[in-house]
Structure formats: C-alpha cells, structure tokens
Image (tube, coloured by chain):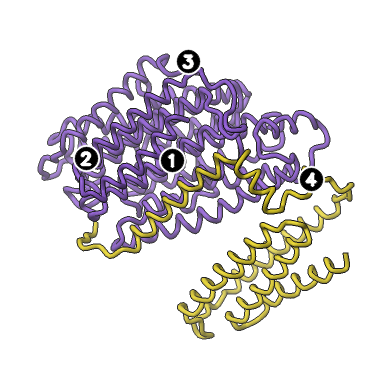
Amino acid sequence: MNSLIVVSILALVVLYLGLFKAKNALLPVSVLGLVAALVLAVCEWNSGAAPIFSGMMHFDNFAVAFTSLTVVSTILILLLSKQYFEKISENVAEYYTIILFALAGIIIMVSYHNLSMLFVGLEIMSVSLYILAGIKKRDFASNEASLKYFLMGAFSTGFLLFGIALLYGASHSFDLSVIAKYVTDHPEGLNPIFYAGIVLIMVGMCFKVGAAPFHFWVPDVYEGSPTLITTFMATVVKTAGFAAFLRLFSICFAPLSDFWMPTLLAITIITLFIGNITALFQDNFKRMLTYSSVSHAGYMLFAIVALGATSSNAIFVYTAAYSLASIIAFAVLILVKEQTGSENFDSFNGLGKKNPFLALVVTVSMLSFAGIPLTAGFIGKFFMFSSALQEYHIWLVVLAIINAIISIFYYFRVIVAMYFKDAERKELVSNGYFKLVLGASAIITVVLGVYPSLITDLF
Amino acid sequence: MSLFYLVAFLSILFSLLVIFTKNPVHSVLYLIATFFTFTIHYILLNAQFLAVVNFIVYMGAIMVLFLFVLMLMNLNKDTEPVKSNLIKIIGVIAGGALLVTLVGASKALQTSAVSAGPNSEIGLVENLGKVLFNEFLLPFELSSLLLLSALVGAILLARKDKKTQNG
C-alpha cells in the first residue's frame, strides 16, 4: 500500500519538475522515488495478514514479491532512458509521469482483492500504455501501434468487464474471498452464468498477456512502439498481467479447474507453437523478440494450467528471468539501432570483435531466453516444467521441450551473427547507465542460474 | 409490466432500425432513440443514477462524438468497401454457429425464483454515494489516477511539438 502511495505521488512530483524546467532532476528523482517504493514494499513482507480498505486490497507476500519485481524492472528501464526520450520530443517529464502512472496501475493489479480494483488497475496501466505507444507522433508505425493497442485493448477490456459482471450476477460480490466461498459452497449447482463469466475473464486476460489466439496485436504494437516502451511492455506489463491472472484463478477458480483447464491447455499449446514457429522466420531482431515474447507467454501459462502450491513461485522466477533477459536484449537493440539505423540480425554482425562486453551480455540474455543451464532462464523453465509434471501434464511438457529446442535455433542466430560474421563497423558508444544496467542484469541472470535458491523459496 | 413490454419492444425496434437504415446519420439518430429507451428501463429498475448517467453521457456526449466522426469521415456510397463472397460465407457460418449456440443455450435455460438483490434501493443516488464513499472508497480514489493519466496523455499527444524527429 505504501509503495502505491509513493509511486502515485512520485508521478505528480515528476510532472511538477517538468513544469519548472528541472530537466536534469527528472531521472534521479524518479529512480530515488522508486527505490523508496521498493524499500517500503519489502518492509511489508509477512505483514499483510488481512485485506485492507474493506477488502479492496491485500498486500500479501505475493503482492510484495511482484511489486518489488516490477519496481526493479522499471528502475532498470528508466536508467536506460537517459538521452533516449530527449530525441523524441521535449516533453520528457510527461513520459516519466505516464510510466510511473502505469506502474501505479500495475501495483494495484498485483495486490487487488476485489474485481473492481483489478479493473481500475488494469485500466490505469492500459490507458498509460496506449499513450506511451504513440509518443513518436510523426512516426506512422508508432501511431499504428497506439491506435491498434487502443482498439484491441478496449475490446478485450469489454470481455473482461462482461465476465466480471456475470461473476457478480452469480455470486453477488466483487470480493475475491466471497467469490471463492461461493464456489466452494456450491460444489454441484453453480449458476451457469458463472461459467460464462470465467470464460470471458479468461479471454480478456489472455488478450492482455498476448497469448494466442489473442496475440494479433502483439507484433505490430511491440514493433511500432519506441523500443524503450516496448521493453516496458514486454517486461513489467507482462509480469503484471500474469500476476493478476494467476491471483484471480488461484484464489477463486481453483476448485473449478476441470472446467477451465482444458481450454487454457489448448491456448498454451497454440501460443507456444505460433510464437516459436513465427519467430523462426523473422529477419528483424525486434520482431523476433516480440514473437519470442508470445512464446514465453505460453511458458508462463504453464503455471496457471498446472495450478498448485508452487505456481506463484514458478511464475515469479520465470518473469524475473524473462524480464532481465528482455531488458538486456532491448537495451543493446537501442544502441545498435542508433548506430546502424536497422533492427535486422545483420546489424549485429561483427559486434563480438568491436564490443566484446555488449556481445557477452547479449549472449547471456539469449542463453537465458533459450533456457540453457547456468542462466536464470533455465531455472524458470525448470520450475514451470516441474510444476506441470506434478499435475501429470506429461504431453504438455514434451511439446514445450520441442518448442524450447526450436527457440534455441533463432536465439543462436544472434550469437552467430555477433561472433562468426564479420562486418566493417565502428565501436558502439554507450553511456555509463547502459553499462551499469547491462552488467547488473547479466550478473543477476548468471547468479540466479547458479544459486537459484536465492529466490526460489520465497513463498 | 405492460410499460416494460412497450419499452422493450421500442428498444428492439430502434436497434433493428440502427442496423437496417442505409443512411449512417439516420442510424446514429436511431441509436440515440435506443439509448433513450434504455434510460427508461433504468428508471423502471429503480436505478436513478444509471439513468441519469446514461442520459447525459451516452445520449449526450458519446452520440455527439459519433455524429462528429461520421460527418468528418464523409461516408458516401462509393467509398463503402465491397465485401467479397468469401467474407460473406464466413459471416454466415459464424453467425449460424452463434445462432445454434444461443438456441442450445436457451433450451437449457430454466426459470428460477427471482433472486432478490442485496438491496433494491441500491440504485438511488444517495445509497450509491454511501457505498462509493464507504466500501468502494479506494477504487473510487484510484480512478483519479486513471483520469489524470488520460488527461496528461491526451494533452501530450494533441499538443504541437516545436522539435520533432523521426526514427
């Protein structure tokens, strides 16, 4: 709760700093404020015993963990924004403000205990993102991304809202614990509209996290948005979407898993195959990353398909690993695009000789994406697969391993381009913030891969 | 009860007219009439607040927006996209599947006793305000973040930049 207040006020403070032309203070103030929010969130560990504000919000350990993860990712992304937003326009303060508003919405999404809070949080996040996707006003791709995201997002919110209304109609409450009690009290005769509500909510959430067959907006939106905003969408927003999805399904719908699990299983398998096979044919690095993000959504859905005691831990480890790897990949893409003007795989040629450090961190990130041992990505996949095996989804794991093998092929194309293809190029210059973020993310990725017990026993 | 049936009949009639009129401006005008019948429904259901909001926001603001967009878009008969046969066949199949689902679902329906809501006076403005500022205070306050974010964003996107750059 405290971190939500801090982030909301921080957004207003940053807006005022922009008004008083304090350009140089924007980044330090934002980062310091977020660090304060992080500390306050961690302090609430083990203290959120009961829902607060008449059951609106429950800041339990799940909420603390995901708030911390999203705040840390946002800090890393904001550190990359030095010199980035200035190139787009002068309204830098507003960009920071809207990112912070989106983060406030995300904190609500990971700590809600009432469906009205879920809706408010989701809308704060989505509306901020529709704007952020379109901040390059003269760029058609950015305009398209913004409009497409807005139309698709509004459409999916309609599904979600209709689902929430039907759940209310059946259970007479928005409160998660009352809905859960309604489900357990009526083992046989649930009102049929309750089932329709579950399906509609599932459709809405799958839209938001970009799972196939509701993934059509993902490639265009991720590719058209400014790369730093894409980083935010692919890491923080995805984490929040899955946290909200898991929270709802594990608290309310767990006893009904026989009803929704087959549907979600089919969605998972379709997502895995569509994401990986389409990514295989991309020549554009950014577009490859967007399709790979669709396929990672498939792996993350494992935790919900095989709902159990370890689900929250599995999704936490997976999203942490995936966020770190994505931040590295997109950060290096920003540097490469600045120099060569292109986002293709070819523009990475010869990077290994000129910029050994950048090539090394990209290699770590790609290995983590592919789930090679000794990286955090492996631990994430290991947790997902073992939780699926506990629920006896053996075929799902077999299909997922086939997909992991397909994905190795396209992730290694980058590594091959960097080390084994020569090209005339100059050394990429990056400022200290980039080195700090890249180095820190790569080190955390490897450390988590070697000592996974640091975060695997949280819950 | 007869009033309900009359209003319900009008709702359906006007919404059919929305779809079947050729002229888009007439279509929007019928949509306004449809929303007006919804307002009467809300009053019949003792939901004052919803009725007022529906009247002001939907019939007023949103419909004016619709009309503006229609006039800006300059919809003539020549610009109307021609739908291919394939799309028509897909539409018929999808619509038919929906119809079968609806018929199947309505066969499974059974009438049950009217379940009394928590409080039938809940739709009155006074009670709604009490709930909003008691139980739902936190989401109510937090929606100010939503409005502020949309406000900042709208101004950000609509303002002219002195310096712009592509890429």
In the image: residue A364, left or right of residue A386: left
Question: Circle 4 marks a residue in which chain?
Answer: B
Which shade is chain A?
A: purple
Residue B114 horizontal/vertical position (percent):
86, 48
Q: Could you tell me the amino acid type at mark 1?
A: Val
In the structure shown, which secondary structural element does the residue marked by tag 4 occupy?
loop
Q: Which residue is mark 1?
A: A237
In the structure shown, which secondary structural element does the residue marked by tag 2 occupy?
helix
Q: Which residue is mark 4?
A: B117
Chain ID for yellow: B
Between label 3 and label 4, give the one nearer the viewer: 4
Instruction: Look at the picture and state if B123 lies above or below A190.
Output: below
Residue B122 horizontal/vertical position (percent):
73, 48
Q: CA distance from mark 2 to mark 1?
A: 26 Å
Q: What number is the disc on residue B66?
A: none
User: Do marks 2 and 3 share a chain?
Assistant: yes
